[in-house]
Image (tube, helix red, strand yellow):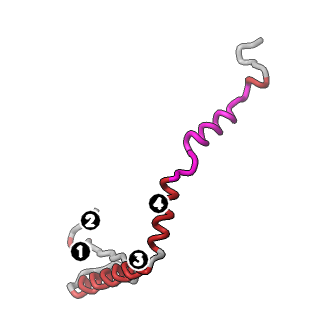
Amino acid sequence: MHLYQAEESEKYDFEERINFAVFPSLQGGPHNNHIAALAIAMKQVATPEYKAYIQQVKKNAQTLASALLRRKCRLVTGGTDNHLVLWDLRNLGLTV
């Protein structure tokens, strides 16, 4: 038998090795702590208290945006409709 010749059953056994390397070795199974964290977060955001909190966060962002605009600061979007304020600082010489 030649050095590189082998029986068919011994020749290509890569499929099982690759499949095992990916799942469960790399991929793993369901992570119960992650599932539990998502369940708790969904339960909390369904409460009226959370809705009131988020409405206040949006009002705070709008107040901040208005105050910055009154002080001649440039906001990229001209204001905010949500909780984000994107302030353009390039005219102040601040860049990345």
Q: Position of residue 86 (x, y in %)?
A: 33, 75
Relative to 75, does residue 12 appear above or below in the rendering?
A: above
Disc 4 crowd rating (10 Å Cα; few below 14, some 14-19, many 20+) is few
- Can residue 25 be seen from the camera position used here? yes
Which numbered disc, 4 or 3, marks the residue that appears first in the sequence?
Answer: 4
Which numbered disc, 3 or 1, marks the residue that appears first in the sequence?
Answer: 3
Indicate which disc residue 95 carries.
2
Which numbered disc, 2 or 3, marks the residue that appears first in the sequence?
Answer: 3
Let me know if residue 17 is in the magenta part. Answer: yes
Three-letter residue code for mark 2? Thr
Indicate which disc residue 91 carries.
1
Outermost residue to the top: 1
Residue matched to label 3: 50
Judging depth in this view, the residue of 39 and 85 nearest the camera is 39
Disc 3 crowd rating (10 Å Cα; few below 14, some 14-19, many 20+) is few
Let me know if residue 76 is in the magenta part. Answer: no
Image quarter of the C terminus: bottom left
Three-letter residue code for mark 4? Ala
The region drawn magenta spans 11-32
Image quarter of the N terminus: top right
Residue matched to label 4: 37
- Can residue 77 be seen from the camera position used here? no
